[in-house]
Image (cartoon, grey):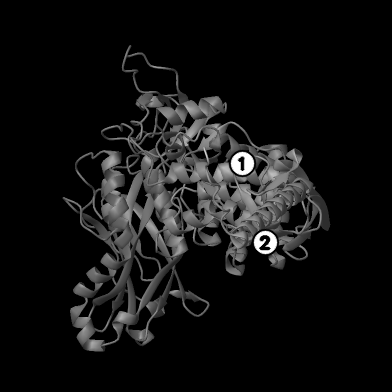
Amino acid sequence: MACSQSSIGATAARTFRAALLASALAVTLVAVSATAGPAASATGRHDRSDLTLVSQTDWVTGASMSLHVSLRSPMPRAHLGLKLTVYSRLTSRYAFGLSESGKLAPNELVLDATPIIPVDALHATGSATLAVAMRVRVSTAAATKQSTLGSPGLALDCAPLSCDGVYPLVVTAVNTSNNTPLTSFTTYLVYVAGQSGSTPLRVAVVLPVGAVPALDAEGAPVLTSGQIRSLAATLATIRHDPDTRLTLDLYPQLLVALADSSFPRAAAVLAGLRALARRSDNSGSPEFLEAPFTPVNLDALASAGLVGEFRLQLTRAADVFRSVLSATPPQGVYLSATPLDNASLAELARDQISRVVVPPTGLPSSASMTQTAPLNLTTSPARSSGARRSGISAAVADSALALHFTQGVPASLAAHRFLAEIALVYFEQPFGRQARGIVVAPATMPRSPAFLSDVLQGLESSPVAEQATVTSVFASVPVGADGAIGRADAVPDRASPPHDFDSSLFAARATLNDLESVVPGDATFTSQVADSILLAETAGLGRAAWTHYTAEPLAAFGQVKSAISLAGTRTVTLTQRSSKVPLTIVSAFPSPIHATLMLMSSTLAIAPRFFSLPVVLGHKNTPFEVPVTARTSGVSTLTIALVSPRGGIVLFEHVYTVRSTAFSIVGVALSLAALVVLALWWLRSRHGRRRRRATERAGPEPAVANHG
């Protein structure tokens, strides 16, 4: 809560605060509890006191400031009081991060403090909101005269005309019975009395709309009524002021979910988005960025060799934007949630995207100042020649400012902390010779519309900052303006994609191609499956959800398979050697199915054209007669398969039993010839046996005497 005496780099500040601010509220409460020990023993109930900022003067340009707080406590009202303490002017964003967390920076100084103001002496609006009107004095005197209780004063220890800056202001609820603190919060007094004529800092706030998948793998909306209600309130805040300069990064997968949602409020949200799109076409505000169908990690896609997937994302997004919002799809500026490597830059160049917003990760930073100008992002030097190829213009998103959109503090306090840090960025170079700009791109929508409303109103009334769109920052702020970094190399290429990211997506895309050949006339069905593959590419998606999305093409084939069957019996009897086997294929799928009918048998001769016959199955019975020839009588099998036209997927496979009772002429002739031969052999054998028996009965012939 005091001024840091050294300038510490903006990158170091952002890194430190990312971890520090996550526990800011807890740290503050612990500090209050530690300093309020005596009060705890006195009351035993002070830990339930709650002090919240309701509103305050955003920019102090004169000698007065108002503050409204809400104080709820179980203690008697007569024992409650407020105390305000102002600390040294901040000179670095690192010190700002410390002050938010209730930590003391080196050389912490208290500039001034009010006496404890009894709550009963303050004007109350409603049941719990207290109005504190303060006078802000510029003084170099060590001692200042305190004002009356109804109008306390705080003195800034600085010379006249040199007081502009950001001062931590701690508001503390006190137990007046023993003067011990109960609870407190830190906001900021932004003094800007001497900034007339300076060039304001251009602030482009980019709100992500639909950054989380709103469709499941089957294409059904998963939006809850609470999410739709929150989105409606945020859009109402944007529509309320037609002069608001804001940028929306709308991912069209949300539009598909809203169009298919059964919640009545979803139609109203779509109508609001259509109105904003029409306003954007006419006036350029709000501005829509060129977003893919779902937020993707372009680096991972490029590293996986998934050439063309990003183009499919953009094409699908443009189609949805055009069909659902009836507006011209935006082009030209792309917001990347991840650093870009050489392959990513090449992909962007192929898709004719020349301006991007990138995170600060992997990029060089100034030693003491925030990057407030675009830079040229170029490919890393080629290994062979050392030459660089031309790159694209990039604006660096400020990650520390984006944290205010998701901080776990009340909306008004978060908004005023955001505005104070914007002012701190301005005061790094309050009278720069060139225009400067900054892009704030939170990962999610703000927690409440009240926060967004306070931010937009604060920027609109600011003497040091102004609302801008991303396009206007690129157009009005020169590359490397006022000493900002003018060029940076892309980050090193990723060695390999995570897990089996590439193989699964390749397989899913191949399966989808097969599916499109099977049901070419059902664009609605295949488009939903294609969307599931695009959703699988969502950056930061968990493995279980990613697996579910990539499995959808096979699941869709399962729907087609389950709709196909064979009618009738699976056993056929043939009474002739050459005959026809009747087949009837039944399709219950709502659109025609294109496939290839294939028949196989080791014992039946099949007509050649049925080895691979293209067929179209309508939403009815489709009969076929397959000419076959039985080589032998008896039982044979006939395998029937229906495959996708490209041969990658088997839709079904069944086996018919074929019984043949037909006689072959050749077989009969051979059988008769065999019978004749057998009969002749039998007759001859029988005649021979008779002769032998007759010879045996006659006896031997008498011997003939030789009378020679």
Q: Return the residue at label 2.
A: 562
Task: List the single residue furthest toward the top.
Answer: 385
Q: Earlier in the sequence, mark 2 or mark 1?
A: 1
* Residue at 34% in and 18% down: 382
Residue type, numbered disc 1:
Phe
Residue type, numbered disc 2:
Ser
What is the C-alpha distance between the residues marked 2 and 1?
Answer: 43 Å
The percent position of residue 372, horizontal first and vertical second, equals 41, 33
Report whether 401 appears left or right of 507: left
The percent position of residue 634, horizontal first and vertical second, equals 69, 58
Nearer-the-camera pick, 58 or 497: 497
The percent position of residue 319, horizontal first and vertical second, equals 69, 41
Nearer-the-camera pick, 540 or 159: 540
Q: Nearer the viewer, mark 2 or mark 1?
A: 2
Q: Residues within 10 Å of mark 2 (few under 14, many from 20)?
A: few
Nearer-the-camera pick, 164 or 40: 40
Q: Is residue 471 above or below residue 190?
A: above
Task: Please report contact status of discs 2 and 1: CB closer than 8 Å, yes or no.
Answer: no
Report whether 341 appears left or right of 547: left
Q: Return the residue at label 1.
A: 288
Check the picture and name the quadrant holding the N terminus: bottom left
* Residue at 50% in and 29% down: 347
* Residue at 40% in and 76% down: 71
